[in-house]
Image: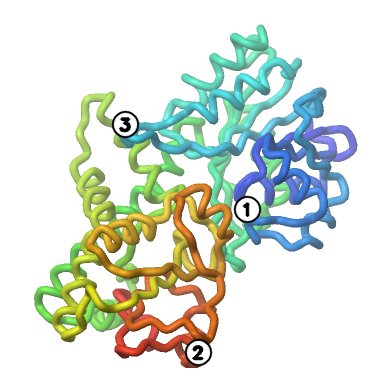
Amino acid sequence: MKLDKNSTKVAVIGLGYVGLPLAVEFGKHFTTIGFDTNKKRVKELSDGVDATEELEKEDILRSKKLSISANVDDLKACDIYIITVPTPIDINKQPDLSPLIKASEMLAPFLSANNVVIYESTVYPGVTEDVCVPILERVSGLVFNQDFFAGYSPERINPGDKVRRLTTIMKVTSGSTPEVADMVDDFYQTIITAGTHKAPSIKVAEASKVIENVQRDVNIALINELHQVFNKLGINTKDVIEAAATKWNFMKLMPGMVGGHCISVDPYYLLHKSENAGFIPDLMRTAREINNGMPNYFANDFLRELILRKINPSECKILLMGFSFKENCPDIRNTKVFELYVVLKNMGLDIEIYDPWVDTKEVLGEYNVEVLTELSPNQIFDVGFLAVGHDCILEDLKGQSLQFSKDFIYDFKHISSS
């Protein structure tokens, strides 16, 4: 099919952190339907309100060719469909493709001649053509690469990042035939100012995405392990990293808890595929074990610090600062702070959580814990535990509007005093 800004109609299925920016940008060029099954989300977006705080009201309303809908019938008569639903893991840390399967089953009845379905969800190599396409064929009755076509262009959204935005991050593209690959690449070039990279196959594009996060997971695991070594040696990890980072090719990372919907999830997709192929990737698996163990490590190290400072853990009131999975972002998906909180509570500690960024109702519904988004002047805490270094929290600490009677803040990244 040929792209025509006057006639090509686009549908983006899933309006979360990935789908919304896509729908908004394509809606500046093509007639675009932004579809989501969450009616509350659709109502808010129709009014220009983005609860994820990724886009401002004017950003959404400026997309003149975009309409937001929760009505599945509005997906009829589109030419290009982009699916951006989550790809989580289950309780056994195995890939959960059910959102992707359901989205494919929902879309399939609306497919018609020459339609292109592009997947952006992070998956292991082969999911698009081996799992999703057969569903599209079976439900629609159409023939793949004859009646309809597929593409894969992995998302590269970085939640909370106000500098690296959708349009300024190079996009990997691919298609199920050489002609479709060219079309998909041209399609994304209409919105991506940073340029595109056309992969030689859908499987290559799928693999390229998943290893982006595997690589980062492994490198963070190394720093987390080194942090534990340096603690044993009585050396400040931040000081070591600052010194090492004076070499041009040193990757500067800090110890931390790896949560969120990407880095802590995606490696399990490649682990699953690798093991099914008969190869056990030890480094990837070990990295996951190290990073998964950090909430427990930090909790125990915090307890050790209290004892060394002669602070009675059973008699001190603790403020756990930060709950979202990363700094300056309201995203609470798979936040490891929850696991940290559970470990601390199970130790019998008196602890409250403070995070001005998060939606308290969302946290209560998802994790069944209460989070303070404001602190009253009469609330007194003995010690602090800085879990997520939101700028607003760091400013409160530096301005001394957040103070602790025992004059101690556990800060494993050493950022509150920098």
**Residue nearer the viewer, 29 or 302:** 302
Residue at (61%, 16%) from the top-left corner? 136
Up the image or down, 81 lies above or below 221; here it is: above
Please name which of the two marks, 1 or 3, marks the residue nearer to the observer. 3
Quarter the C terminus occupies: bottom left
Instruction: Determine if residue 224 is in view.
Output: no
Up the image or down, 50 lies above or below 231; here it is: above
Query: Residue beneath label 3, please?
Result: 272
Query: Could you tell me how far apart the alpha carbons at marks 1 and 3 are, in whole angstroms?
Result: 32 Å
Query: Residue beneath label 1, please?
Result: 195
Residue at (78%, 46%) from the top-left corner? 43
Residue 304 percent coordinates (x, y): 16, 74
**Of callouts 3 and 2, which one flags the residue occurring earlier in the amino acid sequence?**
3
Query: Could you tell me how far apart the alpha carbons at marks 3 and 2 are, in whole angstroms?
Result: 48 Å
Q: Are marks 1 and 3 in contact (CB under 8 Å)?
A: no
Q: Secondary structure at mark 1?
A: loop
Residue at (63%, 55%) from the top-left corner? 166
Q: Secondary structure at mark 2?
A: loop
Q: Secondary structure at mark 3?
A: helix
> Residue 401's mark?
2
Residue at (23%, 77%) from the top-left corner? 237
Q: Amino acid at mark 3?
A: His
> Could you classify mark 2 by the number of other residues whose Cα lies within 10 Å: few (under 14), some (14-19), or many (20 or more)?
few
**Residue nearer the viewer, 19 or 335:** 335
**Of callouts 2 and 1, which one flags the residue occurring earlier in the amino acid sequence?**
1
Q: Amino acid at mark 1?
A: Gly
Q: Amino acid at mark 2?
A: Ser
> Residue 52's mark?
none
Residue 252 percent coordinates (x, y): 34, 71
